[in-house]
Image (tube, grey):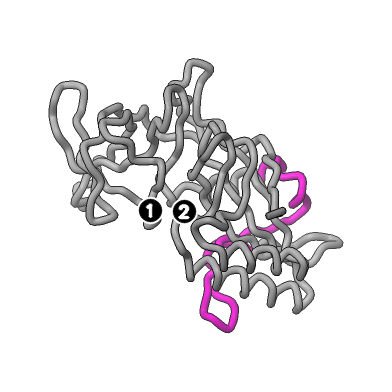
Amino acid sequence: MKFPEPLMEGRLIQRYKRFLADVRLPDGTQVTAHCPNTGSMLGCQPADGRVWLSRSDNPARKLAYTWELVETAPGVLACVNTARPNAQAREAIEAGRVSELPGYGQCRSEVKYGEERSRIDLLLSGHETEPDAWVEVKNVTLEENGQGFFPDAVTTRGQKHLRELMTQVALGDRAVLFFVVNHTGIETVRPADHIDPHYGQLLRQACDAGVEVIAYRASLANEDGSPSGEMTLAEPVPVILEV
């Protein structure tokens, strides 16, 4: 998966009202960019940090710029646009790069399901021997000493998704929690028990109930740490559930 146009570099001034970020461009111009991330973005909004924006020429948009990447440490990049992971996961599955999910002939997005009125990110069907797979996608950008953690804030919505996935397993289908690791410094993924202990407890319960948990890292950076222009998922990352 590639960005359609080269990204524009800038320096983060501030993020505010959750969905807005002021950025200083190299020529000194200050712009307000859309920040498509509902989370806390813990560790992903360093003061005066390098960021990269995409630009849209759509005249109907209120904000032309969208915040896509941030440098969290020298040469370490993270994708903060949470509109990207679903497309990243879908592309990787359809390209056969996700070894846990081969052989499905159809992939649908945002399918309504469950008693708690959820929408599944990806519903895979049409496999010759396997039941349908309900795939919930989560973006992982919180990093501490090479370890990735999810969530970065208490998430009642994420807890609801785990309950819905467990129900699908009980009904005889597959249910998969797919962590998209959009941070080049993350080597493993763990539940963030120090942030949302109930989510961690529920995730382990879901695994015991048969929910599958996988993680794949995106190739965001070149060897020199600059943005590669791609967000391809190609490398599996271990998920560690032990407390």
Q: Is residue 166 magenta?
A: no
User: Farthest top residue?
Assistant: 224
Name the residue that disc number 2 marks: 152
Using residue 193 as the reference point, say whether residue 5 is left or right of it.
Answer: left
Residue 48 x/y as whole percent: 26, 31
Q: What residue do we see at 53% from left, 56% from top?
A: 194
Q: Is residue 69 above or below residue 104?
A: above
- Specify the segment rendered in magenta: 94-123
Residue 193 x/y as whole percent: 57, 58
Name the residue that disc number 1 marks: 40
Q: Which mark is residue 122?
A: none
Q: Earlier in the sequence, mark 2 or mark 1?
A: 1
Instruction: Name which quarter of the figure residue 159 lies in.
Output: bottom right
Residue 35 x/y as whole percent: 31, 48
Q: Amino acid at mark 2?
A: Asp
User: Farthest left residue?
Assistant: 29
Q: Is there a contact, CB below 8 Å, between mark 2 and mark 1? A: yes
Q: Is residue 160 above or below residue 67?
A: below
Residue 153 x/y as whole percent: 44, 58
Q: Is residue 102 magenta?
A: yes
